[in-house]
């Protein structure tokens, strides 16, 4: 089956390539998260059993506390990935501007 | 809380599960940590700028949309939101494709022999234009696409994806909507004991099973236009030990006899139809109900119930960006007029906000937004009596 839903996709940035790049970056971020979960599984199994097979990894079912720990890791991880978006908003709230910054340069040169 | 396992729920490999978990975390993150910033940029820069230019504030969601569309923060959130939706379908579709032979086999064997309920398919049922034009909420192939004999892919994909989309907040059986509506009806009308119940637009039965549990004496029917979701619904219900009679029918015109039901329900059906279809569906409800029978349709709250034009605008995002073309217009329906035109007493129409059965106030965003539509802990109910 086609993996594309019928209906023309909206693009949000002035340049649609930015939307595409963001989609690609988030897919890569997702794959890193998958690898990290797999590593977490391997570590937990090794800690428990000392050795493991690929089947052990496939059969591993994280319990609620592991699921929560992984979700918490992903939340912090996403915060790192999306840092710039939050900083932009913080800057806006603080009323910062580049003019203000340049003013600081001028001020410090004289005081 | 993990999704309740049943015979036809797709299994995930270690990495498929990790991929789906990532998307769930991503969606939760967007809802909790990125989406709320839209309100801030609106209040702090978009609205003041609009006021400066027009000498007044934006008068409706369309003006907000135009103004917000140029804002880089909103653009970023929207782009991420759309991408999260595409990633969700992609991750679930890939997993279902891998095990489709197995799922088709299980659905076939689980739905045959001595069963509690039944399944009646009708290949002559046409896919209505409101499902054929675009794939609703971006599910590739929608509810109806069949690529092989006895296909259940659309149902399997939907079951898993709804759990991810709602971020688990519809409960382990994705039953929050049905549970909330059924709880409300039992609490509000304790004497009402329906013998026959019809669920319109039932898809895989997430909201059908709660009615079986709420009224164990009743015979419960579920109809939908999509064959693959119905095959899946039947196998799912049997696996969970619930008795439902599923049939492939369009709610605009069914083959049930006049006055066949005491209670007709639907959950988030209305916004996936069209302005003409919903009128015909109301006519059909009136024909199918016995005198004294009731209909209850669950939706997200109408725009009129929103706090302001900004909340309307956020709620309307799906209309333009998530393949929900009737979402906006459906949230402006005059329900009294709609019911009155179909023969119901318009003065007796009840429009209610019912508490979400599974709402855990602490975990909710308090904002109506994608994937957390009961975010404020309430569902909208449209109730009429014949």
Image (spheres, coloured by chain):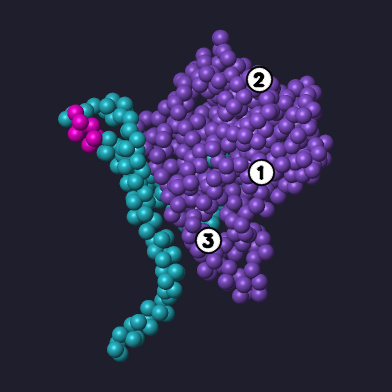
Chain colours: A cyan, B purple
**Which SS does the magenta portion mostly show?**
helix
Q: Are marks 2 and 3 on the same chain?
A: yes
Magenta residues? A42-49
Where residue A66 sits, quadrant-wise, is: top left
**Residue picked out by circle 2:** B219
CA separation in Å, label 3 and label 1: 27 Å
Does residue B227 appear in the picture of this structure? no
In this picture, is B12 found above or below B101? below
Chain under label 2? B
* Dot label at residue B47: none
In this picture, is A19 found above or below B384? below
Q: Are marks 3 and 1 on the same chain?
A: yes
CA separation in Å, label 2 and label 1: 26 Å
Point 44% across, 26% down: residue: B5
Q: Residues within 10 Å of mark 1 (few under 14, many from 20)?
A: some
**Residue picked out by circle 1:** B352
Where residue B176 sits, quadrant-wise, is: top right
Q: Are marks 3 and 1 in contact (CB under 8 Å)?
A: no
Q: Residues within 10 Å of mark 3 (few under 14, many from 20)?
A: some
Circle 1 SS class = strand
Q: Which of disc 1 and disc 2 is earlier in sequence?
A: 2
Q: Looking at the image, which is closer to me, B38 or B267? A: B267
Q: Residues within 10 Å of mark 2 (few under 14, many from 20)?
A: some
**Residue B85 at x, y = what percent?**
50, 44
Q: Looking at the image, which is closer to me, A10 or B55? A: B55
Residue B178 lies within the magenta run: no
Chain under label 3? B
Where the C terminus of chain B falls, by quadrant?
Answer: top right
**Residue picked out by circle 3:** B39
């Amino acid at each position: 089956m086609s993996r594309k839903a019928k209906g023309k996709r909206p693009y949000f940035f002035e340049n649609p390539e930015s939307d595409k790049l963001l989609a690609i970056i988030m897919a890569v971020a997702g794959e890193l998260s998958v690898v990290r979960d797999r590593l977490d599984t391997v570590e937990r199994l090794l800690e428990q059993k000392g050795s493991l097979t690929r089947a052990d990894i496939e059969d591993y079912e994280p319990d609620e506390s592991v699921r929560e720990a992984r979700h918490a890791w992903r939340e912090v991880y996403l915060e790192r990935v999306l840092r710039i978006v939050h900083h932009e908003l913080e800057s806006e709230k603080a009323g910062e501007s580049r003019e203000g910054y340049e003013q600081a340069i001028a001020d410090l040169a004289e005081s | 809380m993990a999704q309740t396992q049943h015979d036809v729920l797709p299994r995930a490999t270690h990495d498929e599960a990790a991929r789906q978990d990532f998307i769930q975390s991503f969606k939760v993150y967007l809802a909790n940590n990125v989406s709320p910033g839209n309100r801030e940029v609106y209040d702090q820069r978009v609205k003041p700028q609009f006021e400066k230019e027009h000498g007044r504030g934006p008068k409706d969601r369309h003006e907000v949309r135009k103004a917000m569309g140029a804002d880089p923060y909103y653009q970023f959130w929207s782009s991420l939101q759309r991408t999260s939706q595409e990633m969700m379908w992609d991750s679930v579709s890939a997993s279902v494709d891998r095990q489709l032979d197995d799922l088709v086999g299980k659905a076939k064997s689980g739905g045959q022999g001595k069963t509690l309920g039944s399944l009646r398919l009708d290949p002559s049922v046409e896919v209505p234009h409101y499902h054929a034009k675009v794939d609703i909420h971006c599910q590739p192939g929608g509810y109806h696409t069949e690529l092989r004999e006895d296909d259940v892919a659309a149902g399997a994909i939907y079951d898993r994806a709804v759990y991810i989309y709602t971020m688990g907040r519809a409960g382990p059986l994705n039953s929050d909507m049905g549970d909330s509506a059924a709880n409300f009806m039992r609490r509000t009308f304790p004497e009402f004991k329906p013998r026959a119940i019809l669920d319109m637009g039932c898809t895989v039965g997430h909201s059908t099973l709660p009615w079986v549990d709420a009224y164990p004496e009743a015979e419960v029917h579920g109809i939908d236009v999509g064959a693959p979701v119905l095959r899946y619904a039947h196998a799912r219900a049997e696996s969970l030990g619930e008795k439902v009679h599923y049939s492939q029918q369009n709610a605009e015109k069914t083959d049930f006899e006049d006055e066949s039901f005491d209670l007709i329900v639907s959950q988030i059906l209305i916004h996936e139809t069209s302005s003409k279809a919903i009128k015909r569906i109301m006519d059909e409800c009136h024909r199918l109900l016995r005198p004294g029978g009731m209909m209850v349709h669950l939706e997200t709250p109408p725009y009129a119930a929103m706090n302001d034009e900004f909340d309307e605008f956020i709620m309307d995002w799906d209309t333009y960006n998530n393949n929900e073309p009737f979402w906006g217009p459906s949230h402006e329906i005059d329900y009294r007029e709609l019911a009155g035109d179909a023969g119901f007493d318009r003065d007796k129409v009840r429009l209610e906000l019912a508490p979400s059965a599974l709402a855990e106030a602490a975990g909710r965003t308090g904002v109506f937004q994608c994937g957390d539509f009961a975010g404020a802990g309430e569902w909208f109910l449209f109730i009429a009596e014949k």
